[in-house]
Amino acid sequence: MDELLKALQEGDKDKVNNLACSLLITHDGQINRPQMNEFERYAPCMIFPIEKDSFGWLIGGIKYNGKTYSFG
């Protein structure tokens, strides 16, 4: 979580995507809600679906410090 927060603070989109994918997506491709909720409490951010279909999230978003970073 520290690394993801640091990447958000630095505005490193590629690193945010890589770290968020490993932290917030389960091995079967679903959103990891416990991790998502914990990270939202840990960092001043909001995690939400940017795009989804009937199976779930396709692209996730992290809104941090007025900017939105995508992952997935």
Image (cartoon, rainbow, N blue to C red):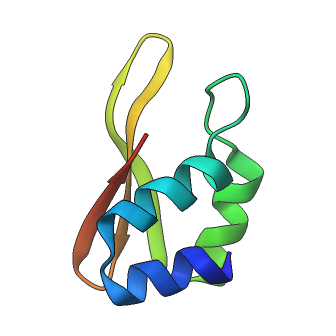
Q: Is residue 44 visible?
A: no
In this picture, is 21 found above or below 46? above
Which quarter of the rendered picture does the C terminus lie within? top left
Q: Is residue 4 visible?
A: yes
Q: Position of residue 8 (x, y in %)?
A: 41, 79
Q: Residue 2 occupies which quadrant of the picture? A: bottom right
Q: Position of residue 58 (x, y in %)?
A: 39, 28
Q: Position of residue 43 (x, y in %)?
A: 57, 83
Tell me what residue is drawn at x 67 percent, y 61 percent: 37
Q: Residue 29 occupies which quadrant of the picture? A: top right
Q: Which residue is more in the foreground, 8 or 49?
A: 8
Horizontally, is 36 left or right of 56 in the view?
right
Q: Residue 66 occupies which quadrant of the picture? A: bottom left
Count of numbered badges drawn on the protein: 0
In this picture, is 2 found above or below 47? below
In this picture, is 44 found above or below 18? below
Horizontally, is 31 left or right of 67 in the view?
right
Q: Which residue is more in the foreground, 51 or 12?
A: 12
Tell me what residue is drawn at x 26 percent, y 65 percent: 68
Q: Position of residue 21 (x, y in %)?
A: 55, 48
In this picture, is 48 found above or below 5? above
Q: Residue furthest top?
A: 54
Horizontally, is 41 left or right of 69 in the view?
right
Tell me what residue is drawn at x 72 percent, y 68 percent: 38
Which quarter of the rendered picture does the N terminus lie within? bottom right
Tell me what residue is drawn at x 77 percent, y 53 percent: 34
